[in-house]
Image (cartoon, helix red, strand yellow):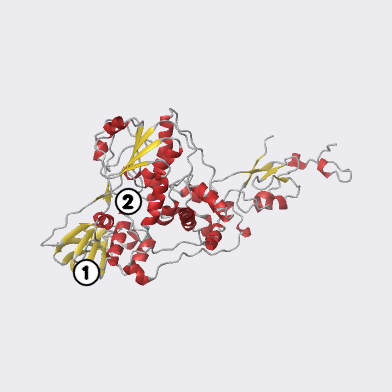
Amino acid sequence: MKKPPFAITLDVGSSLANHTGSWRTLKPVYGDHLPPCNNQCPAGENIQGWLFHAEGGDYRAAWEKLVEENPLPAIMGRACYHTCENACNRARLDQPVSIHAVERFLGDLAIREEWRVPVTAARSGKRVLVIGAGPSGLSAAYHLTRLGHSVDLVDAGPKPGGMMRFGIPKYRLPREVLDAEVQRILDMGVTLTLDTKIENIPKAMADGGYDACFAAIGAHLAKRVDIPVVSAGRILDAVSVLRSMETADEPPKLGRRVVVYGGGNTAIDVARTAKRLGAEEALIVYRRTREMMPAHAFEVEEALEEGVVMRWLSTIKTMDEGTLTVEKMVLGPDGWPQPTGEFEAIEGDTLILALGQAVDTSVITNVPGVAVNKDHTIAVGPDFQTGHPGLFCGGDMVPAERTVTVAIGHGKNAARHIDAYLRGTRYEPAPKHTLATFERLNTWYYTDAPRTVQPVLNDLRRRTTFDEVTGGLDESNALFEARRCLSCGNCFECDNCFGVCPDNAVVKLGSGNRFRFNYDFCKGCGLCATECPCGAIDMVEEEI
């Protein structure tokens, strides 16, 4: 017999008849919240999802969850600048989780074990042309294939990979890693044609019987600046130097003293490459301060460790044979560099310009309906489609930050919109959950766990070889690192709510199925929400 909650007389063993749930004004609700790492990832990875499997030691399941969004984890674990770690809530406890290191471990393990991605979708009968075998084109080809479409991938270069191959040096991205992950995509049935430049996209689509096209041409054109050359001064561009490391029979001869003009990651890469090619001096000249350099701080530090010299607040005015004239700069009242009229001569056999890259968009600008932005990128809608029906663009060709991670995200998202276009529907991304902020967490339950440090190649070999500088984690420390994840905003079945509930209102549903509340007995005290380590419980107003 049910008794009202104010009942005084209870039979022995009949406390379950006292339904205290009617006292409640607030009730606890389990929910999934958006981890800040997931929210930050430009490739849209479910980082917390694959870390969950990794911390349980199920690396195959972790990798399979990872490649649902990103087909190049071994590459991303090296080339991505892991902004997800900047957002990681764990940073406010001790240090962020080394997400990129665990991702790299999973990617390398998949290469060693020769794991493959099955294509289970029914064949659609649709054909898609993808122009550009860089990160964005490879990502689009991968996802379109998994969605059931036939994909032909065409690239003007001699090898696939785009700027991952021709812009990132081997000491950061070994070519056997790049080749293995590209081959996995090709093994899914993607057809690759190299050394072929598409001159007329509408004609190529018509001749090939393609139902859609995704263009993702990388930024292979170097931007230049006019520097007066008095005599036989040698001026090169950074993109050409890095590209020649992959395509030339012999590495370029840069001389004993190399000067690099620029402050981005490409400037850092080409200066470090010059040191490895035997330059006694590699000097970077940059017109702003170190704090203003667009290059990532860790790359600047690695370059300094390898003997690269930085000269900030300086600009190059002229070049003579073996000598460059540099003007000193100062920061003006507005915080930007101003010329001083003070000049100084520095020695340099070769000047390498690293002033940014541009995309050759000539193949697409004349296509009917295509619009070009003021910054010479291609105008696309939220679905990555241009004004020409069936023609989509992504990667370096559209307005966005130019990184491998962003490009991979473009390829994935464009593929989903192309799939919808081919099926006559519209792709609508699922709505995002509420962000799992640090304030939601009960950090008392988490122990201190210092971040795992990746091994680094010794200084002498870094200066003289192109061996990979940063090593990977082994299984033991990759497992430890994965277990540092706080599972922000998502239940990991710690049983705290079950243990602290004074009303026995939390019901366990079995491993992997989490819990539910029995609201007949929950009186809304909120202990479960307060004691939940990961902030997976919300207290919401009771509906009357």
Q: Residue furthest bottom?
A: 460
Residue 309: quadrant of the picture = bottom left
Instruction: Please indicate, yes or no, whether residue 48 appears anywhere in the rendered image.
Output: no
Give the side of residue 419 with respect to residue 228, left or right: right
Quarter of the figure that contains the C terminus: top right
Residue at the image point whose x is 65% and y is 49% from the top: 529
Outermost residue, left direction? 231
Q: Is residue 434 left or right of residue 4?
A: left
Which residue in the protein does label 1 denote?
Answer: 256
Quadrant in the rendering for residue 384: top left
Mark 1: which amino acid? Answer: Arg
Q: How many marks?
A: 2
Q: Nearer the viewer, residue 95 or 386?
A: 386
Of pointers 2 and 1, the one earlier in the residue sequence: 2
Relative image position of residue 154 (x, y in whole percent): 31, 41
The answer to whether residue 141 is seen in the rendering is: yes
Q: Secondary structure at mark 2?
A: helix
SS at badge 1: loop
Q: Is residue 378 above or below residue 494?
A: above
Report the front residue among 305 and 241: 241
In the rendered structure, which amino acid carries the disc numbered 2?
A: Met
User: Looking at the rendered structure, which numbered label has been put on residue 301?
Assistant: none
Image quarter hosting the N terminus: top right
Q: Tell me the residue that label 2 is attached to.
A: 163
| Residue 224 pos. (x, y %) | 21, 53
Q: Position of residue 488 (x, y in %)?
A: 56, 51
Q: Residues within 10 Å of mark 1 (few under 14, many from 20)?
A: some
Q: CA distance from mark 2 to mark 1?
A: 27 Å
Nearest the eye: 120 or 356:
120
